[in-house]
Structure formats: C-alpha cells, structure tokens
Image (spheres, coloured by chain):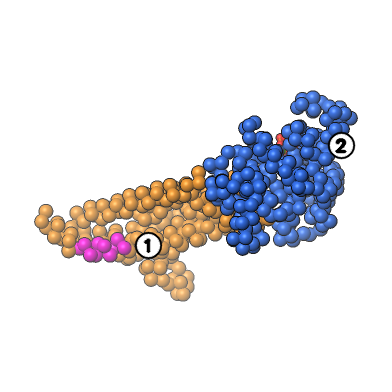
Chain colours: A blue, B orange
C-alpha cells in the first residue's frame, strides 16, 4: 500500500531522515514511536508531500508518487497529480488545523465539494454521516472555536475521511489534548482500525499502540532502529536505544 | 448669523453634490486599490522572484513619494509622454488615488495573509486543495477579519486624501471650500470640516460593526 525506499530528508545541513525503508500493507496499522526530534513527523509529512524528500522513492498503491536523488527529481510528477495523491492519503495533525471560519459540517464538506466536485447535497449527507460516525451528530453547525479539543480532532478525522483516502496518517493526534479527552479520539481511531483502514500513527500513547497496532516502529535519530509486533517491542526490545526509550516513557 | 444661515442653505445642494463627489472618489479609488492591492499582495508572496521584486518595487515607489506628486504625474506628465494617456480629471483622480492606496492595501493584505497559521495551508494541501483554491476558500476569508481594522484606517486616510485632487481642478468638498472662501466667506471651511468629520466618524463605526460581524466564529 505504502512503500518507502531509502528515504533521506535534510533541512539544509541538518539530516533528519537517514535512509528509511518501510512497507505498510493494506489494512495494516503501524505505530511509530521515538524520542522528540527523531524525525517521526517529517517522515509522515514526506509521505503526503508536505515536505519533499531529498533522496528515495515513495510508492502508494503501486504508483510512484516521488522519486528523488540529492534533492533532484528523477521523475517529473505534474502538480495536479501530486495534489490528487495528497488527497488520497488523509492526514490528521496534532493541532487539528480545522478551518475556523467554517462549521463542523462545512469543514467536512469543503474538500469533497471543492476538490472532488461532489454535488452539495450529496456531500452534505455524507458529511453528516461521517460526523455521526465520530459521535458528533449534534455538533454539525458549531464552529471549531466552540468545540473541545477532542471534538475538534474528531471533526478533523471526519474531514480527512470525507476524501475517502486509501490510507490515513496521524501525527500525534492526542498530544494536544487534555488527558480526559484522549480516550474519545483513540476510540474513533480504533473503530477505523477495525474497519481495516491502513494507518500510520505517530503516537506517545503506548496503550493504544499495544492494543491496536499490527506493527510498532521505533525511530531514533532519523533511522528505524527496531520494528516488530507490539509484543516484541514492548516486552522484549532488542536494542539498547529502544530499551532506554521505553523505560523512560512506560 | 442670519447671513451665514442663508448663505449656507443656498449652497447646500452644491455642498451635497460635492460630498457625493468626494465619496464616489473614495469608493472608486478603494475598489481599484483593493483589486490591484490583492494582486500586488499575492505577487509579493509568490514563489517567483520576478513577481516579488516587481511588487516590492511598486510598493516602494508609491509609498515613498507624495500623493500629490503622483496625482500630477498621472494628470500632467503622462499625456506629455503619449497623448493617448490623456485623461479627464475624474478618471485621473480615481486612478491616482487607487494606485496609491493599492500600495498600502497590498501591505495590509499581505500582512493579514501571512498572519494565518501555516497549519491551514497544510491541512488544505493534505485535502488535495490547490494553491489557488486554498487562497480563495481558506486563507483569504480568514484574513478578511484581520484586515478590517487596518483597512478601515486606510479607507479613512484615503477619504481625507481625496481633498488633494482639488489641485487638478476636480470640484469636490475641498475645492468647494476654497472657491467659496476666496469669495470672501472663509467661514465656509467650518461646515466642510464638519462634513469630513461626520464621514470619517461614520466609517469608523461601520468598520467596527463589520469587524464584529466577521468575528462570529471566534
Ligand atoms: N521545516 C523544518 N526546517 C528545519 N528543520 C526542521 C523542519 N522541520 C523539522 N525540522 C527538524 O527536524 C528534526 C526532526 O523533526 P520532527 O518534527 O520530524 O521530529 P519528531 O520526531 O516528530 O519530534 P516530536 O516528537 O517532537 O514531534 C528536528 O530536529 C527538527 O528541528
Ligand atoms: Mg512530531
């Protein structure tokens, strides 16, 4: 589904990703853990073109979406195509990034109407269903500023799902939330996992990773240090760095 | 006193006409300024260096030279370069005022656009929205509320600056005041000042209301 080959990313002289190889299968839930600054966000952002990789190849659903070497394209991908590819991979941000001038419903309808050119009433019906599925049927006409963080994040998930993405990327979706609101968002994500959505989740919620992930990846300093089932990573980590990290967070 | 009142009433219709001219000038100029200012602002934040430089240069020139000089340049100098550029007072005044306010409005628009959280651009991009669509649907609507207060200030400045075009012979409020007072009735500056004051106060209130209206989602 998503295949990353030899991904490198630098910001100027700062090497942030140093040769990442990762393949995520259809319907698989992969959790990415690791210390701050290890490049987890950057990795997700590269997958849907919010950052351009320096070197490497990204394939989504059999289609090469980026192929670069030392900052140069090895393959010219028209910007229209890039946008389409972006919209096929949903992204949920730590800070929600809802559109504040639109109600919950309008937030969810925006891209289907403007990008997919869906008729308004069809888009609205779908948006209402999506909002209901994340437990917000009574908040459709509310502006984001009047919603709690947990509710905002659930709207953001519904908004991403409205584009019928092939995969969903979550960048610490619960880190900006008050502890009592974390559960409701994780619940929605679990539901998605049960529906066999392909997901890459950067998270500090080890409980969630243990329960939902098919595979856990530990990243440090721009490389994947260790990967395995939650069992393997959490109960029998092989690398010193993994052990040290887990002993700090668990 | 009786005299003043009679003289004032006699001139009242002309006074209203001149008020209308002043308002028309201000509105037309701000419209030109808004459209052109938006283009300049988008050029100023564009990916293309040439567009950025051109826009920067324009803003630098128009903010760095006196408005009166710009008016003269357009009304007197352009026709000497080419007769095709000869304009009557009205269009010349609107263009001069509009081009000037475009430079100021461009900076206001650019500031408002750049004050919008980068996360908004990213969220839109992740949903597959193009740059143009993102500007139109996400960034510009949000910038509008932030633009309203400085935009209001700029409009009020422009309203007062319309008085400068009296210098090319357009009869608006200021020119009327000068004409009447040169006929010996210099008290006439006072009602003119009152009208400017009423207009600027009125628009101050209108812009405050607008700002409130656009804050519903905050
Ligand atoms: N746009 C950028 N320009 C320059 N440096 C950047 C940029 N984005 C990220 N970095 C740097 O890249 C490194 C990795 O950042 P990244 O956000 O991917 O880490 P992370 O693993 O997500 O950390 P956290 O857990 O704190 O979110 C950091 O050193 C960061 O300062
Ligand atoms: Mg991060």
Residue A59: image location, x then y, percent: 82, 53
What residue range appears in magenta? B11-20
Residue in the picture at 63% in, 48% down: A132
Q: Main secondary structure of the magenta part?
A: helix
Q: Is residue B15 one of those drawn in magenta?
A: yes
Residue B52: image location, x then y, percent: 60, 55
Q: Which residue is mark 2?
A: A228
Where disc 1 sits, the SS reads helix
Residue in the picture at 35% in, 54% down: B160
Residue A83 found in image quarter: bottom right
* Residue B199: assigned label: none
Residue A26: image location, x then y, percent: 82, 50
Q: Which residue is mark 1?
A: B25
Q: Quadrant of the C terminus of chain A?
A: top right
Q: Is residue B184 one of those drawn in magenta?
A: no
Residue in the picture at 69% in, 42% down: A188
- Front position in the image: A232 or A137: A137
Residue A199 horizontal side relative to residue B14, left or right: right
Q: Residues within 10 Å of mark 2 (few under 14, many from 20)?
A: some
Residue A84 found in image quarter: bottom right
**Dot 1 beta carbon under 8 Å from ligand 1:** no
């Amino acid at each position: 589904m998503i295949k990353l080959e030899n991904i490198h990313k630098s910001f100027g002289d700062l090497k942030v990703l140093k040769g990442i190889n990762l393949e995520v299968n259809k319907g698989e839930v992969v959790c990415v853990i690791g210390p701050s600054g290890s490049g987890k966000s950057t990795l997700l952002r590269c997958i849907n073109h919010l950052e351009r990789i320096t070197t490497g190849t990204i394939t989504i659903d059999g289609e090469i979406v980026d192929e670069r070497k030392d900052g140069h394209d090895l393959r010219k991908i028209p910007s229209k195509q890039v946008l389409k590819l972006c919209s096929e991979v949903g992204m949920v941000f730590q800070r929600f990034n809802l559109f504040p001038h639109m109600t919950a419903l309008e937030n969810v309808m925006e891209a289907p109407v403007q990008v997919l050119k869906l008729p308004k009433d069809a888009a609205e019906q779908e948006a209402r269903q999506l909002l209901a599925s994340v437990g917000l049927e009574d908040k459709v006409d509310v502006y984001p500023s009047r919603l709690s963080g947990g509710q905002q994040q659930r709207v953001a998930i519904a908004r991403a799902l409205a584009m019928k993405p092939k995969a969903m990327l979550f960048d610490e979706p619960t880190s900006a939330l008050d502890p009592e609101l974390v559960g409701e968002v994780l619940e929605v994500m679990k539901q998605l996992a049960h529906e066999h959505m392909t997901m890459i989740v950067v998270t500090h919620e080890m409980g969630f990773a243990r329960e939902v992930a098919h595979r856990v990846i530990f990243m440090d300093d721009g490389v994947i240090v260790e990967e395995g089932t939650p069992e393997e990573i959490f109960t029998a980590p092989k690398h010193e760095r993994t052990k040290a990290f887990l002993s700090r967070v668990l | 006193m009786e005299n003043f009142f009679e003289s004032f009433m006699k001139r009242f219709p002309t006074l209203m006409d001149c008020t209308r001219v002043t308002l028309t000038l201000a509105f037309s100029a701000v419209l030109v300024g808004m459209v052109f200012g938006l283009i300049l602002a988008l050029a100023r934040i564009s990916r293309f260096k040439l567009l950025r430089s051109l826009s920067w240069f324009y803003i630098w020139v128009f903010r760095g030279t006196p408005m009166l000089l710009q008016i003269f340049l357009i009304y007197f100098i352009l026709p000497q370069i080419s007769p095709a550029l000869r304009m009557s007072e009205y269009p010349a005044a609107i263009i001069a005022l509009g081009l000037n306010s475009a430079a100021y409005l461009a900076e206001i628009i650019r500031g408002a656009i750049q004050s919008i959280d980068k996360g908004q651009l990213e969220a839109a991009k992740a949903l597959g929205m193009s740059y143009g669509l993102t500007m139109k649907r996400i960034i510009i609507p949000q910038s509008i509320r932030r633009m309203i207060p400085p935009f209001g200030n700029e409009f009020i400045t422009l309203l007062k600056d319309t008085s400068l075009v009296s210098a090319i012979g357009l009869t608006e409020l200021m020119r009327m005041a000068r004409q009447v007072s040169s006929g010996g009735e210099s008290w006439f500056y006072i009602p003119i000042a009152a009208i400017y004051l009423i207009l600027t106060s009125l628009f101050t209130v209108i812009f405050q209301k607008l700002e409130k209206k656009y804050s519903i989602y905050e």
